Amino acid sequence: MSQPLPRLSRYHGHGRPPAPVRIAHLGLGNFFRAHQAWYTEHAGDAAEWGIAAFTGRRPDAARALAPQDGLYTLVVRTAEADDVEVIGSVSAVHAAEDNPAWLDYLRSEETAVVTLTVTEAGYRRAGEHLDLDHPDVRADIEALREDPTAPARTTPGRLVAGLIARRAAEGGPLTILSCDNLPGNGEVVATVVRELAEQVEPSLLPWLDSDVDFATSMVDRITPATTDEERATVREHLGLEDASPVPTEPFTEWVIQGRFPAGRPRWEDAGAVLVDDVAPYERRKLFLLNGSHSLLAYAGSIRGHQSVADAIADPTCRAWVEAWWDEAAAHVGLPEADIAAYRAALLERYGNPRIQHLLAQIAKDGSQKLPVRVLPTLRAERAAGRMPSAAVVAVAAWIAHLRGAGAPVGDVRAEEVVALARGERADAVRRVLAELAPDLGADAELATALTDQVAAFETAADA
């Protein structure tokens, strides 16, 4: 009978010694561990920059990583082989409910940066502002008014509570750096934090102006969900058990705009790019990569595909993606050569058969994703008097998805948007369009084009 393999653990000499915590992170998911944590691991001064990472509402990741002292393996899947690396930049892991630990990190002068990967829905916005009518936001306002150390339900609430604690402790300046797929994500964080602070503790606002840097970043690395295949790969390569390895692709990109008044790791040693204006890079990524991902998630799943690699191998899906890139590229603001190279890299990445990026995973929260990934191009094309056929495909595929075609609906606004999409097709399209893009709700020509395309998708789904 074979002996069980040892579990990954610093106590047993695996990985490197934990660095002192100087970064607090919200969102202990696979993307964070394949991206920001990887860049921190490969910074030249990594021994000085440990991360304390907190989960979202589910504590599973903390439970898996705590016995491993924050260590995990990154499984980089090329088309031919695997590269397995132990990542040691996460010095501490906590469940979301460990509010005392969160406040202690924010009070500490040693903490210089707070990073976030909480998804688009995590910022609790309605339009461009904090959703003050959301029950969780209202609960945070009431709880923090009564006791600023109370546990918060939302990301804005947790940030405001932490910032109140830091100011009271005279913890010094701090950078908050969003790593979510939102254009101008630094301004998004600044807005929701300021608007919540105004409700809870208005005197915090001048201190935010003087001591808090809301930095912006563009992030990119395809990171599927973990499966037993990655656990088996770690056993084969390292002879160890890892409860929570992370699969990812070879490509990675991080473009950052910020002041970092309390310092930061030398992320540029790992390939991060520091710029004065991240906006064109955000548009390139959001429109070309994320926009085509959303198109494939809905249209590809309607055609019966399960993963990005499967969908991009379908000539019809590939043609839709190429047409989308043609439409969106005109609104990115980078040189044609840059766009062409990026498109070629995307096709190579999408075609990697060993990255099982599931369309059902990408399809989640379309009500939050389409407004930043697809609508800017749709609006710009309609303003120019053109009917953008590929943008129509993307939006129509989402509407058909809400009506039951393709991947199952998993959306923070599922009940509301699914209800709008029910009933007679043309009426449903007009209702969803008016909700998704009120400024386009009266565009009868667009509604007709969408209705025709939804009909085509529903016919294909029924075939």
Image (spheres, rainbow, N blue to C red):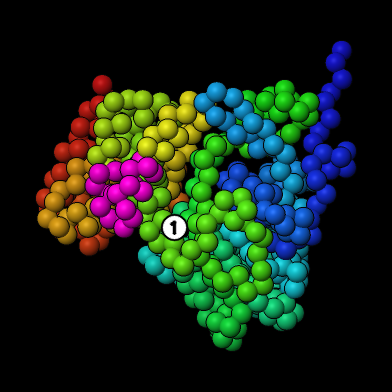
Q: Which residues are magenta?
A: 325-343
Residue 386 point in image, percent of width and height: 13, 51
One can see residue 21 in this view: yes
Residue 425 point in image, percent of width and height: 20, 41
**Where, by quadrant of the figure, is residue 305 drawn?**
top left
Q: Nearer the viewer, residue 355 or 281?
A: 281
Above or below residue 58? Residue 151 is below
Residue 164 point in image, percent of width and height: 66, 77
User: Which quarter of the image is occupied by the N terminus?
Assistant: top right
Magenta stretch containing residue 327, yes or no? yes
Question: In the image, what residue type sits under mark 1?
Answer: Leu
Q: Nearer the viewer, residue 199 or 339?
A: 339
Q: Residue at x 70, y 54 (%)?
A: 44
Mark 1 highlights which residue?
A: 182
The 10 Å Cα crowd at callout 1, few under 14, some 14 to 19, many 20 or more, is: many
Q: Secondary structure at mark 1?
A: loop
Numbered marks: total: 1
Q: Residue at x 19, y 42 (%)?
A: 389
Residue 159 point in image, percent of width and height: 61, 68
Magenta stretch containing residue 453, yes or no? no
